[in-house]
Amino acid sequence: MAGGCWSTQAYRGPVPAWLDEATVHNVPIGLPYVVTTSASAAGFIFSYPLRAHWQNKILWVVRTPREGGPLILELHPIASPTPLVKFSRPADSGPGEIYPSGIEVPTAGCWHFTLRWSTGRAELNLRFVAK
């Protein structure tokens, strides 16, 4: 389905087994989701389609233990290293290896995301439409 861009595909429907396990079998039903290129993290998109200049809700799920560390997100438009948008989310939600977040970008288009947490790193690309 639409939502990802470049190397990232957006899906709706059954999730990979690791994603079900990382959420402690508490997968949000019916929401579109994306999986990082390394299959080490995923995001459930509550605000679909994603919009520029809007507080978009994404539930991030990581495959490896958080070990109490935050999720650091850095994103920028695919065609440019700027503007660089940074977010940090504490490991204060459960069940499972999850980080709820609100993501806001200043322009529509494809954005490259780099996610970092205590035991991992992952990348993906998401499309944001004009508000």
Image (cartoon, rainbow, N blue to C red):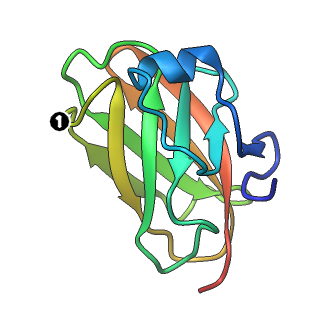
**Residue 3, x across and y down, in percent:** 72, 58
Eyeballing the image, is 16 above or below 55? Answer: above
Residue linked to disc 1: 92
Residue 99 is left or right of residue 44, and the answer is left
**Residue 8, x across and y down, in percent:** 75, 41
Q: Nearer the viewer, residue 29 or 19?
A: 29
Residue 77 is left or right of residue 53, and the answer is right
**Residue 25, x across and y down, in percent:** 44, 23
Eyeballing the image, is 124 above or below 62? Answer: below
Eyeballing the image, is 114 above or below 121? Answer: below
Residue 59 is left or right of residue 7, and the answer is left
Q: Rate crowding at label 1 as few (under 14), some (14 to 19) or many (20 or more) other CA atoms within 10 Å.
A: few
Q: Nearer the viewer, residue 31 or 63?
A: 31
Q: Nearer the viewer, residue 35 or 24?
A: 24
Query: At x 60% / y 34%, what residue is drawn?
Result: 123
Query: In the figure, residue 34 lies in which quadrant?
Result: top right
Q: Amino acid at mark 1?
A: Asp
Q: Residue furthest bottom?
A: 131
Query: At x 37% / y 13%, what residue is drawn?
Result: 119
